[in-house]
Image: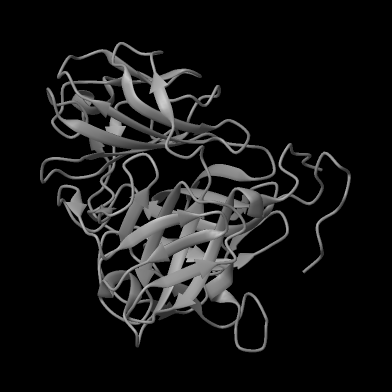
Amino acid sequence: MAYTTINKSGDYFNTKLYSGTGSTNAITGVGFEPSLTWIKARDHAYSHHLQDAVRGTGKDLYSNSTDAEYSNANSLTTFGSDGFTVGSDNGVNNGSKTYASWNWKANGAGSANTDGSINSTATSANTTSGFSIVKYTGNQTSGATVGHGLGAVPKIIIVKNLNDTENWVVYHASLGNTKRLSLNLTEEETTDSAVWNNTTPTSSVFSLGNSDKSNNVNIPYIAYCFAEKTGYSKALSWTGNNSSDGPFLYCGFAPKFVIWKCTNTGHGWIIEDEARNIDGNGYLNGANSREFYPHGNNAEATSGPRFDFLSNGLKIKDSTSADINGTNSFIAFAFGQTLVGTNNVPCTAR
């Protein structure tokens, strides 16, 4: 049985659903002060809004766009001790719409990190939960390194050029250091030595090539870095089998959030979470799955069942969709709650 140093996953990650008001709207019940908040309207085709405490509030990034960082005083305006406040921007707070938000705790605004050859402007790291936010300025030197502050090897790194209309780039450990994915695209994995310099991250730094996507000279970047933590987070990979008896993906915890992508054909990213997949009667794993597509601004979509969210992982139920269980390759990252923590107290059964 997986023991963990994280006795309550809700202290570090939480999905919060809310309704818009059209005016200043304080969202509470997250359970901590977020360092990264990702918001998406459920019932309208607004962009995905990402804001973090390192860049500061009022500065949007859109996962479905190549756009540079956008100053927006009416988007997320405050990170609070139990959530966040949004302004009147339709993408986060239309009075007739509902929203999902995913929230991660790092360490606030962070501080400078000098572990790499590029000194980061700020690194906000939570070594307990394995999540850090890093802001750095590129130098377009192949072999440059940047400190991530995790004290563990990151399995996922997501980077965005803040000044230019460049694609997001994603590192996943199962693809290795020669490959990249793009968060805003449906494209398959691409071999690109200019992004990660064909070098695997270490417990202190990640490496960069000379790509404009990750290391252009004098350009600011933001990086979201995730290490695996027993009983809380897991990098996953699998090959589909085109069967209703799909692969079982062992996590060692009960997943609450999963983001996945087919890597060898052109299918998009998909997000599911436990909060939206509980039906009107309070049941999980029903006839439908509710999902978002980070590469697009689509409203929440309903499909046939994709996964069963189980006490120790994910069981694929979809036998027909090439974007989850075709005879293709897939990667994912999941967050959730272990069965037993270091305090030997079992989680409440489902």
| Residue 181 makes an appearance in the image | yes
Residue at left 10%, top 46%?
Answer: 165
334 and 98: which one is in front?
98
Q: On the picture, is 273 further left or further right than 341?
A: left
Residue drawn at (44%, 32%) of the image: 110
Q: Is residue 303 left or right of residue 341?
A: left
Indicate whether 122 appears above or below 10. above
- Dividing the picture into quadrants, the one containing residue 180 is top left
Q: Is residue 221 above or below residue 283?
A: above
Q: Position of residue 78 (x, y in %)?
A: 40, 56
Residue 86: give x, y in percent of width and height: 37, 66
254 on left or right of 269: right
Specify the farthest residue to the right.
344
Residue 233's spot in the image, x, y percent? 59, 44
Using the rendered image of the protein, determine whether residue 320 is visible from the camera's viewpoint: no
Closest to the observer, 286 or 60: 60
Q: Quadrant of the N terminus?
A: top right
Colour theme: one colour
Front residue (pair 289, 296): 296
The residue located at (81%, 65%) in the rendering is 349
Disc count in the image?
Answer: 0
Q: Residue at x 42, y 73 (%)?
A: 25
> Relative to 86, is 195 above or below?
above
Identify the image quadrant of the C terminus.
bottom right
Q: Position of residue 65 (x, y in %)?
A: 19, 56
Q: Which of the 4 quarters of the picture holds residue 194?
A: top left
